[in-house]
Image (tube, rainbow, N blue to C red):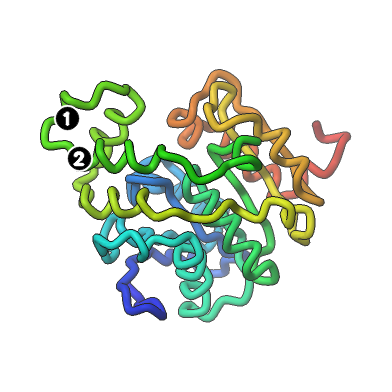
Amino acid sequence: MDFTTSDGLSVSYDDIAPEGYERAILLVHGFASNRNEGWKRTGWYAALERRRFRVIALDQRGHGQSAKPHEPEAYRRENLARDVVELIDHLGINRVDLFGYSMGARVASAAALVAPDRFSNLILGGVGDKMLSERPSARGDVMAQAMLAEDPESITEPFLRSFRQFAVEQGEDRQALAAFVQVENPPLDTDSFATLPMPVLAVAGQRETNGDPEVLAKAFAHGHGVIIPGCDHFSAIPHALTKAAVFDFIDGVLDDPWAR
């Protein structure tokens, strides 16, 4: 399914609503991924459906089946966050749980800051306390160069080469992804994290390069941090322990010290 954003772009999404569902969750994937790769293939659709969630997942602009403009200005974080809010408006839903992974966690955080009354829970995966001190850097330029390189063998940094290979495997538009990372977004208003009224879970692998999720969780008034043993950024998202942490959080188990 598709909807048209307020700035005229087509955004594709899945909306899977089992009969008698009790709550809805919106899933926001990471950079160079898409709703199928980020959430369905990794088992989240199936796990959430077994729990009778209404599962909503979008392809962020520039990814998957959504529109792929080649102008960096289209990918301002405020636009990405607005897409999230406009999707639940389009579906006529008042409140959802919101789960973003990696770059999607940053978008989810921005959406929660813009419209905190629309989200019952906020789940941030694949991020840690480095998110609290992020500033614009040259990283986007080198990622853009990797995406646009004619010869992938010319990419010497393994991290950049892995994202380039992943984008190719997913059939993504490398020019759109280059534009995505070239926009200069201002830092997230992390000082306002403490004002968010909803419970927040930060969950990441033990070998996550984005920092410590337990430290990040302390920035929120109602934050919980969980580290998944033995996992890195990519292996944490499909892991059963990540799913267990998310469901424990939503069920309120993490609020009960006797349940730990």
Q: Please say if 39 is above or below 59.
A: above
Judging depth in this view, the residue of 1 and 227 nearest the camera is 227
- Residue 17 location in percent, x, y? 47, 67
In terms of image quadrants, where is residue 138?
top left
Secondary structure at numbered mark 1: helix
- Residue 36 location in percent, x, y? 33, 50
Left or right position of 149 against 250: left
- Give the mark, 2 or 1, whose residue is nearer the N terminus: 1
Please name the amino acid that badge 2 sits on.
Answer: Val
Give me the residue at 25% from left, 36% from top. 146
Secondary structure at numbered mark 2: helix
Look at the numbered discs 2 and 1 and tell me whether their residues touch, using CB distance below 8 Å: yes
Residue on which disc 2 sits: 168
Instruction: Give the label, 2 or 1, closer to the camera.
Output: 1
Quadrant where the C terminus sits is: top right
Give me the residue at 54% from left, 50% from top. 106
